[in-house]
Amino acid sequence: MHHLVEVFLQLGLVILGLGVLGAAAGRFGISAIPLYLLGGLAFGVGGVHDLGEITAFLDIGAEIGIVLLLFTIGLEYTPRELVGTMRTSWRGAVVDLLLNAAPGVICALLLGWGPLAAVVFGGVTYISSSGIIAKVMTDLGWLGNRETPTVLSLLVAEDLVMAIYLPIVTTILAGLAFAQAAWGLALALLAVGAAFLIASRGGSLLSRFLASPNDEILMLKVLGVILVVAGLAEQVHVSAAVGAFFVGIALSGEVSHQAERVLTPLKNLFAAVFFVNFGLQTDPQSLPPVLAVAAGLAVVTVGTKFATGWWAARRTGSAFTGRLRAGLLLLPRGEFSIVIAGLGVSAGLDPQLGSMAAAYVLILAALGPLAPRLADPISTRHRKKLRARRLKSATGAEHVV
């Protein structure tokens, strides 16, 4: 009975606290994500109060949150649109890998962590947080923007790279044979191909199976399919979020609109849990010794990620504002970066790697939701300057005549 009381009290206070923080963010017109992260940090490892009774629930809830975020993003696109975007954005994916893995590799080597730690830390700085980015795009109403497919194609490409990267790194860290990594890699690529084939060819069948005039039945069917596919994706070392993304792409017609409507409240709840749980897993006392280096690395990778998004959006025909939005959206790091760092620490690499990754991710996870809001004001000033230059040029030409 005492255990149940503690669970209800802790869980109730966490959810109530998230509501208060969300209301405060809305009052000041800012994203609630940084406040969720700071709230988790305050009550996490070494924080003001232990939330150990609900740790398991928060861990699972966080995973459900990112799965539902990517599912709802997938609902906005069709397989044909995704293929078209990937064809035009694959160069951007290569640029993304080269520009953003390099700072982590170089940093680890300069700190003397060794080549294996450098490979691990390169993964930490490379991959953006699809969970945070999906939430920001939804909050800002940017899902229908021209640059959004470019951003999504880069995120999907990053998750596909992870499908290759994680089996290899895990095998190397464990000291196993390369043949095992090759088998895991082949299985991951086969799973991704099968998921896309099902999404493109079997989407209508899936939609008919899930269709229901009753919201409750539809919610149960759709949520069940999402979680089953997410679990199968994790089983073959593909991100659960990628599996959920493909389920969203497969749905079409009225079923997709109905699914989005009935799952939105669940998505909002578990997305908030995801962000607070991220903060809960970080020990505040481990951050000060590495904060300066982490901040410097964050500055470097803000530049490289922004350049990636700007370049990729420019190649797909986005205007100045779209390029700004794409570059600023890609800045946050999150769940995957922490997972990768955790693999390295568990394998006995330099323990400072974990603290550095936590500080680095926390900085960019807090900055990520705020930076995209600068895009429209910067774009407005840019347009005003252009109009002023044109007016000045026209006035000068009249004087010459």
Image (cartoon, rainbow, N blue to C red):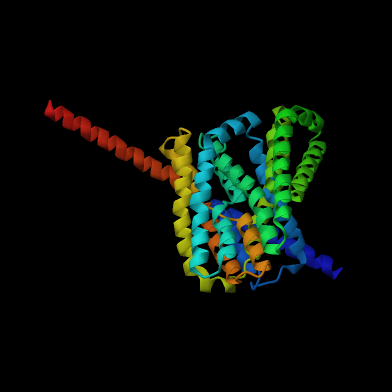
Q: Is residue 161 left or right of residue 102?
A: right
Instruction: Name the residue furthest left.
Output: 400
Would you say residue 137 is visible in this rendering? yes
- Which is nearer the eye, 334 or 267? 334
User: Residue 281, percent across and down?
Assistant: 65, 65
* 387 over 140 or under it: above or below: above
Instruction: Name the residue furthest top.
Output: 401
User: Residue 302, percent across and down?
Assistant: 47, 54
Q: Quadrant of the N terminus?
A: bottom right
* 389 over 178 or under it: above or below: above
Q: Is residue 380 left or right of residue 277?
A: left
For the image, the number of numbered tags is 0
Q: Quadrant of the C terminus?
A: top left
User: Residue 246, percent across and down?
Assistant: 69, 38
Residue at figure coordinates x 61%, y 68% from the top left: 42
- Which is nearer the eye, 233 or 358? 233
Q: Is residue 237 left or right of residue 154?
A: right
Residue at figure coordinates x 61%, y 43% from the top left: 156
- Which is nearer the eye, 401 or 18? 401
* 319 over 53 or under it: above or below: above
Name the image quarter holding residue 338.
bottom right
User: Residue 295, percent across and down?
Assistant: 47, 64
Instruction: Name the residue furthest right.
Output: 1
Would you say residue 330 is visible in this rendering? no
Residue at figure coordinates x 75%, y 27% from the top left: 204
* 287 over 265 or under it: above or below: below
